[in-house]
Structure formats: C-alpha cells, structure tokens
Image (tube, helix red, strand yellow):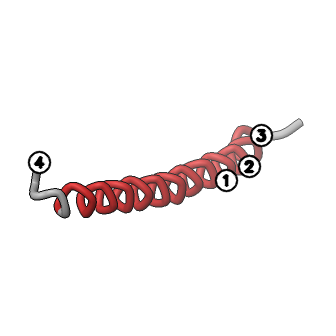
Amino acid sequence: MQTLLEFLNPVKQVEYLIAIGFLVAFIIFWRLLRRARRASGRESAGKGGE
C-alpha cells in the first residue's frame, strides 16, 4: 500500500511534464503566428497599403 506522498510524487512529475510541454507548444505556436503575420504584412505593404 502506498502512502499519499508516494502516490503524489509521480502525479506531480507528470503534471510538470504536461505544463512544460504546453509552454513549449505555445512558444512554437506563437512564433508561427508571428511569422505568418509578418509574411502577410509584407505582401500588403507592397501593394500600396490597400
């Protein structure tokens, strides 16, 4: 039989891994959004701002 602390240690480790994975995914997603916005901004800037 496990104690509560013995049970919570692996659960906490998985929670931290999920949080780190979410942060990494968010940073990658944010950079993709910024790259797409810059690319679309360059196209419209070449057309005289219309």
Marks 2/1: CA–CA distance: 5 Å
* Mark 4 or 2: the one toward you: 4
In this rendering, the count of numbered labels is: 4
Contact, mark 2 vs mark 1 (Cβ under 8 Å): yes
| Image position of 48 (left or right of 30) | left
Residue 29 is situated, as x and y percent measured from the top left of the image, at: 46, 53
Say what amino acid the circle numbered 1 marks: Gln
Q: Which residue is mark 1?
A: 13
Circles 1 and 4: CB atoms closer than 8 Å: no
Residue occupied by mark 3: 3
- Mark positioned earlier in the residue sequence (3 or 4): 3
Label 2: state its secondary structure.
Answer: helix
Residue, disc 4: 50
Q: Pointer 2: what residue? A: 10
Tell me the CA gap for discs 1 and 4: 52 Å
Secondary structure beneath dot 4 equals: loop
Q: Residues within 10 Å of mark 4 (few under 14, many from 20)?
A: few
